Image (cartoon, rainbow, N blue to C red):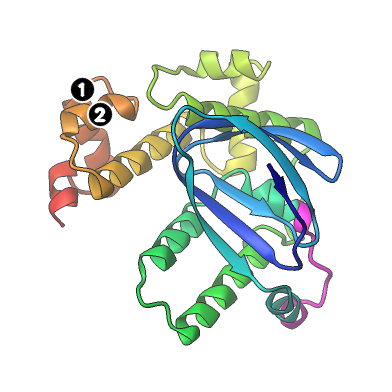
Amino acid sequence: MCAPPTPDMHIFLAEAGRATMDVDAEGQRRRCEWAPGRLGFASPDQSNVVSYRAEDPLRSMQVTIPRCTVERIAQELDGRPVDFERIDLSVDKGDPLLEEAIRSIGATSPLTDLYAEAAATFLTVHLLTRHSGSADPPAPHREDARVRAAIALMRDRMGEPLSLADIADEVHLSVYHLVRVFKEATGETPHRFLTRLRIEEAQRLLHTTDLPVAEIAPRCGFATAGALSTAFLRHTGTRPSTYRTS
């Protein structure tokens, strides 16, 4: 599949399906995992050739922000040129606020011009401030790639028993080194990050399906419904059944 270049900025949120994708962006090749909740970013004026194979249909939400909006807000913030490559690498690590904002926009109907303009402004300010700021130096290139690989593994194998040793082996780091570089890059330990991913997936399934908690639990990596309920209460302050009814 070839996505021709456009002058605007695009953000993608995967909603359904799983696949391994090989992306060729202007000669830069990389492999990424398509899974529900994964964020993607496409820079303006950049063509992408994507190849993949999936057993189930893939579904996503897409937000397009006009290039003129991005440039106007960048000028108002600090006047620096927008580093789209850095935004791409940063968004690839995940962003719960960005994910929830896109879901909220998709659930809003009707989407008035005023709402759309305000949403575009908020998303652009967030991207330029959170994912393109110069205050925090980027992680070393090699370590950054391994952290992204660890996160991709967590998303891909969320429903499986996954230990720190398993993740460390896959990205060719010691457990100690993995915990250190992962926390430097994300602000969380691998264990807490994986648990948060699992809780977020459980929230999504509780919100969008009628599956019983006993079926949701193993899909999110919890051995029993009780284990999910305990973790869910600890992280959200409420139990799955209460969350669903609310």
**Residue at image x 76%, y 68%?**
7
Is residue 217 toward the left or the right of residue 51 in the image? Answer: left
**Kind of residue at disc 1:** Thr
Residue 55 to residue 36: above or below: above
Residue 59 to residue 55: above or below: below
Res 125 → quadrant: bottom right
**Kind of residue at disc 2:** Ala
Give residue 121's position: percent from left, percent from top: 58, 77
Instruction: Classify the position of the C terminus by image quarter.
Output: bottom left
Nearer the N terminus, badge 1 or badge 2? 2
Q: Secondary structure at mark 1?
A: loop
Q: Which residues are magenta?
A: 75-85
Give residue 220's position: percent from left, percent from top: 33, 30
The residue where tag 2 is placed is: 217
Is residue 145 toward the left or the right of residue 230 in the image? Answer: right
Q: Residues within 10 Å of mark 1 (few under 14, many from 20)?
A: some
In the rendered structure, does residue 199 fall within the stretch colored magenta? no
How far apart are the alpha carbons under marks 1 and 2?
Answer: 6 Å
Give residue 109's position: percent from left, percent from top: 35, 73
The residue where tag 1 is placed is: 224
